[in-house]
Amino acid sequence: MVALWAVVSASLLGLPLTLAESPLVQISLRAPWPTPPLLLEVVEFISREQDVDVFDFISNLSSNTNLLAGKETNSRSVYNDLLTAVSGVNGHQYLSRNTSLPLLKLALSLHSNAPLVQAHYQYYRETIIPQHTKKGKTFNQDCDTWVDWYGVQACNLQDLNILVSGDRGETSGQSEPELFAFDHVYHSSPAASSRTAILYADLHGPTFPKMHKRLMELTQSNVLTYILRYKPSAGASNEHGALHLSGYGAELALKSTEYKVTDDRNAEKEDASSETSTNAVIASDESSDRLHEDIPSVKPLTKDEIKNIGFRTAQYILDATNPLPTFAKVTQNFPKYAHILSALSAGNQSLREETMHNAMLLRRSTGLWLNGLEQDLERLDAFSLLRIMRTEADLVSSLTALGIPAEGAIELLTTELGQQASVDVTWGTAFDVRSDAVLWWNDLEKDTKYQRWPKSVRELLRPSMPGQLKYFRRNAFNLVFFLDFTNEAHLQAMQMLFQFINQNVPMRIGVVPLFKTDEEDDRSTIAARKFYHLIEVGGRKAAKRFLDTLADDARSQEITTSHVNSVFNKISHGQAAPADFSVEKVDNYMTAAKALFQRLGIQPTDDVFFINGKQLELVEGWQRTMVGVYFPMLEYLAMKVYSGEVDDQTDLVDFFVTLPNVYPRRNSLIFGAEPKIVDVSRTAKFDFVAGIDWLYNVIDSVATTSIMVVADYDTIEGVELARNALTYAVAANATRISFLHNSHSTRAQSFNEVLVHQAAHTAVTWKGDKNTQILLDSIEKALS
């Protein structure tokens, strides 16, 4: 938790304060813990730099006695010394790119790493100290830096050397210590010693440099693994005061008595000479501050003045000598300056064209792009901006490492890849769910309950509150639910959909019964047939009574086949079938549903629904997920209406299912769950990738694609996976492949792994030699 406090200041950021003006209210956030040493925040920043050894940085700093041993840990001189140190100590460079230094300054100003340092401190106070004091052993809390050697404390080099030279089992008999995400771990090689020493260090303490140097020597000699954790200074108090947090904002929604309602009914009858005089003054004094007035005031504007005031304001800001301060001045007190801005000339045609182009690109009134990547302004803050900038800096560095200049890398990242690059669909892959099997429960365009709603799609352009649904009489948003009518959770979801319709939620809702296609006597199949039968005989009212009854009964009992038949007989009793009714109609529904299941790859046990073809999971909280897709679709549709690509004659159902991101079929192997990305390259520092045997299908060129097949080759599935990957690798260009055996067996390597690797070698060398298939077939037959 943070404490919020306010200070009333007698100045307005350096502006003159008159007795008639109100004092400024300043808001600050204060953390309940003291400000950590700047050194620790710098260490945490360096630890995230690419290809930078944080232990080497600490080792070089340990020779700077003025920096480490100084009493002031957060002074300006310490800040400047640290910036000098990260830029280069003893010929070492600890910033992986030129942009790292400004990012470090931003991180220090935000204290973005302060919570991580505090996590070290809290773990030390609440876990380490109680563990050692309860053991009944000697524990000196006054040690500024000490080593935890399997539960035994070493406060000096002599004790450390004695513990390290002894037998670990005889020392404490404890298991290996638990590691945490905030630990800094140093070992000389992947085959480093299994013995672990944890240094709880005050980096400004007198003992730290010697202890750190000794642990580095022992680690480099492969004697132990060195783990660094921070501890508070011995006897530390809140001497630096509480940490004042930056990067947060607070809004005081105070009603201003100065912005009063002005009678503008006669605004258009203003004296034309007065307007001409104003324009003449502005035109003749281009170099002066046009917004400077002794007493800025709110004046009424005509309809024509309001129409172009946005463009005139943009042109004024861009033409200013200092655009950013001018932008801040205009936006902070816009009503007072509006009458001045509306009188400015608007003759910059190129700016007007650019403004119109930007309006076509934007899906909302305000947008921010960073290296061509649009940011969510509702979620963006100083901390997320810092993370995004570090990610972008890493990406630019990866491109410059290939020999591309920084300017070229930025140009490459900001280049739109085709017409659909960054301005179109943002909700991902979708599918065409149109089918005769879908039963629609409402129709916004035809049902009388929606007749009072506006029908034009231009209703989307009307301003509304953020997060508000758009009520207009078009089937723009179509929900299709696949529901098993014998599943309690699915029946409860159906009840929620009925509430949506009763509450006039502006969405068309459709349902497809979900059942086992190969079992005619299954309860889900029977429930689906009864549902379609009631639709044809009694209409949607009878079908709704059928589902309501099943939903009520499902709360207290399991829905069985006999129960489905009993409810159906009760609902259909006394209802005469229409003259044109036939069982073939029900069969046609079931056939259409089976074809839809096959086309979309839907299984009887799936929990799925679609909004305009976008597949979502029918799990707890599905309403929030649905709304999260609704608004991007709404913004996209509004943009198309604004650009004229969608009008009142457009069929919105066909519009959404014919977008470039929509597929007619869904294969669960291709469009399954979101894949988990494993960045194998990050293990290169442990020589993991370097030790893998790769098989190349190229000789004189570089392999641009690497396939690593991780499987249990003692199973049929593992061998089949290897076969499929190998088939692709042989046919693809510039590809290499490797096989890793992943088995529960304790053997380091299986016989089948050797055979698979030999088969792959033969296939890659001889481009699909038939002996490879024979060998893989023999392995599968042996496993089966």
Image (cartoon, rainbow, N blue to C red):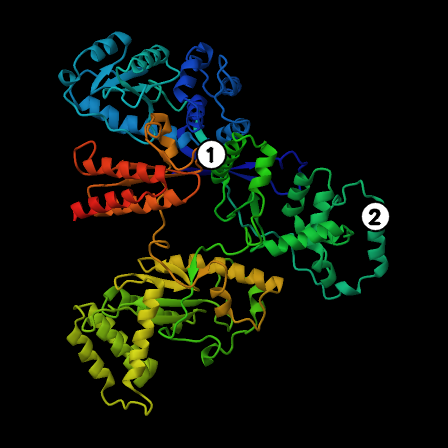
Which SS class for mark 1? loop
Please name the residue shown 19% across and 78% down the image. 565
Asked if residue 747 shows in the view, the reply is yes
Residue located at (21% from left, 33% from top)? 749
Residue at mark 1: 701
Number of the front mark, 2 or 1: 1
Return the disc, 2 or 1, that comes first in the chain's sequence. Answer: 2
Give the residue type that dot 2 points to: Ala
Residue at 27 percent across and 45 percent down: it is: 773
Tell whether 482 sits left or right of 452: left
Left of 228 or right of it: where is 22? right
- Numbered label attached to residue 344: none
Residue 154: percent from left, percent from top: 25, 13
Q: Secondary structure at mark 2?
A: helix
- Report the residue that reaches farthest toward the bottom: 579
Q: Can you tell which mark lies on residue 283?
A: 2
The answer to which of 478 and 500 lies nearer the viewer is 478
Across and down, in percent, residue 271 comes to: 83, 61
The x, y position of residue 51, in whole percent, is 44, 25
Name the residue located 47 percent from the left edge and 40 percent from the top edge: 384
| Residue type marked 1 | Ser
Label 1 neighbour load within 10 Å: few <14, some 14-19, many 20+: few
- Residue 49 against residue 489 in the figure, above or below: above
**On-image quarter of the N terminus:** top left
Report x, y in % for residue 645: 59, 64
Pick the front one: 543 or 297: 543
Q: Residue furthest top?
A: 158
Nearest the viewer among 261 and 87 is 87
